[in-house]
Amino acid sequence: MPEEIPTTEQLMPAAFFGHGSPMNALESNRYTASWQAFGRSVPRPRCILVISAHWYVNATAVTAMPRPRTIHDFYGFPRALFEVDYPAPGLPELAGEISEIVKPTWVGADADSWGIDHGTWSVLVHAFPDASIPVVQLSINADRPFDYHLELGAKLAPLRARGVLVVGSGNVVHNLRGLNWAMVDGGFEWAQRFDSDAQERMLTDPTGFAALDAHPDYRTAVPTPDHFLPALYFAGLAGAAPADRPEVLIGGYAYGSLSMTAYTLGMACPSTGEGAGSPAVGTQAPPESSNL
């Protein structure tokens, strides 16, 4: 059992980010501005725990290496994106803490197979650019139903009193085959309907977020669950803290079939202003040949 970590009365905030294209790591737009404002507004965390859409495997595990590698889990993008390095340290002891907190749910410790993927670093290069805060990732177990992920998110709530910033990173609406490169900042009607209804659910009844699989637009908005599931972890955290109300950090759409909505919990959303939105990915990276 790990050494007991003292708790504090002040809870760390939590967040969910719609991370969109990896190109956001290199861009300056209204989404990246909101991520920067978020990073400036939160108390300095002891560690950042990220549930990223891009560690979607058949197990529940936590990275437990002292120096996680920067993973470039995509192809078809400019060389500059592959040269991005986010050299944040890890925090191996957090794996033991999480294992104890979520019992009887089993969580493995990954000492060498994963690291920091682009669902994590494309946001953190803006929110915490000096990469000095330890970063740990929690995998998404593809074998488990929605309720499992919602409940596991709720079980992570005590970490907020231990100085851990818990972050989900995905996209509530994420349909790569539906991308329209001309709709740089636009959303199809079905995408807007689903994202709007999801937003209402998150803000009023976060524990009901898992029921969105019954929504008439769900199959189009969420053809695969990997990018949707990180929002369930945030919803679980919100449901476990009824005194804290989720807020929308920023909203918007990219290429018709991606929603960029981001949420915070336990903090007033900082003002980020307006401006240009999505990066110009370009048609040289067709949807089936890239990992957004």
Image (cartoon, rainbow, N blue to C red):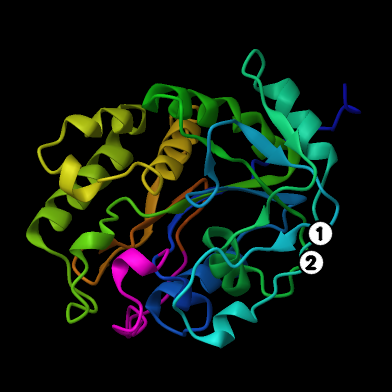
Look at the picture and state if 231 lies above or below 155: below
| Magenta portion: prevailing SS class | loop
Residue 179: x percent and y percent?
22, 68
Residue at the spot of label 2: 132
Single out the residue that lies furthest toward the right. Answer: 3
Cα distance, mark 2 to mark 1?
A: 7 Å
217 horizontally vs 134: left or right? left
In magenta, the rendered stretch is: 270-292
Q: Amino acid at mark 1?
A: Pro
Name the disc covering residue 89, or none: 1
Q: Please say whether residue 10 is one of the residues in the magenta stretch.
A: no
What residue is at 74 percent from the left and 62 percent from the top? 69
- Identity of the residue drawn at 55% across and 73% down: 36
Q: Is residue 232 above or below residue 39?
A: above
State the image quarter where residue 163 is shown.
top right
Within 10 Å of the Cα at label 1, are there few (<14), some (14-19), or many (20+) other Cα atoms?
Answer: some
Please check the rendered image and state whether residue 284 is part of the magenta-colored stretch, yes or no. Answer: yes
Q: Amino acid at mark 2?
A: Ser
> Which numbered disc, 2 or 1, marks the residue that appears first in the sequence?
1
